[in-house]
Image (cartoon, rainbow, N blue to C red):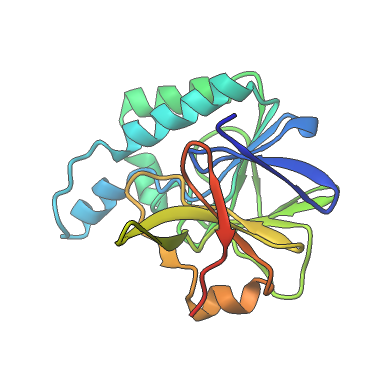
Amino acid sequence: MNTYTFTLAGAKLVALPSGALWWPDEALLCVSDLHLGKSERIARNGGALLPPYETRDTLFRLDADIRETTPRTVVCLGDSFDDLDAANALTEEQTLWITRLMAGRRWIWIEGNHDPGPIDFGGMHLAELHTPPLYFRHIARFGTSAEVSGHFHPKASVSRRGHRLTRPCFLLDSDRVILPAYGTYTGGLHSDHEALNKLMRAEALAILLAKPPHPIPMPRS
């Protein structure tokens, strides 16, 4: 199978090669940091004119994961939109696409630092979600456990055949899992960054996005 299965606080979870997290027992699909509308936000603020295809590509992959898993609940872990204006600037096609994906299921928007307020879509808008035994929030909290979060866009590097390969990754230890950014136009923070070193236990794994996802000891400085 093109997945990686692990247990957090007794919950059996599945890392998908797209960067989504699947909780079969709850029929819950979780994604983080979609950053929809990023190219529009950059152009609006005088930045580079990037090809405006990232929203469509991100929604295409999310659509595929939803069709594959048929979740009852979808949790978007914050920074779903690159800012609140980007949510309002989506095309009619994109808005209808999101509305169609939401139809018939429980959809939860967790607040992020890029989208801290309610957006003009349906679903539930929460600061965080507790579905026992797990807590879903945008930014990990030091000293907590049973936590699913995003925000950091983690990535990790391995050397293979003399070449350095860098991939987005999940970070996993006995306390938490940090999801990679799901959005197409998103950078990443290397796993050896001080912020991630402080959060993750010594035995932490980096689960590199691949088919299937590939676990390695979390690279550190």
- Horizontal side of 135 relative to 153 (left or right) equals right
Q: Residue 13 in the image: x percent, y percent?
A: 72, 42
| Location of residue 137 with respect to 76 vertically, above or below | below
178 or 218, which is in the foreground?
A: 218
Which residue does the image show at 43% across and 66% down from the upper left? 189
Which residue does the image show at 53% across and 43% down from the upper left? 213
191 or 158, which is in the foreground?
A: 158
35 or 122, which is in the foreground?
A: 35
Q: Residue 77 in the image: x percent, y percent?
A: 58, 49
181 or 129, which is in the foreground?
A: 181
Q: Residue 207 in the image: x percent, y percent?
A: 56, 52
Query: How many numbered dots are placed on residues in this image?
Result: 0
| Location of residue 36 with respect to 142 vertically, above or below | above
Q: Residue 50 in the image: x percent, y percent?
A: 17, 47
Q: Is residue 87 something that shows in the picture? A: yes
| Location of residue 29 with respect to 128 vertically, above or below | above
Q: Is residue 137 something that shows in the picture? A: no
- Horizontal side of 149 relative to 184 (left or right) equals right
Which residue does the image show at 73% across and 29% down from the upper left? 27
Of all residues shown, which one is farthest toward the front?
161
Asked where in the image residue 70 lies, by quadrant, the reply is: top right
Q: Quadrant of the N terminus?
A: top right
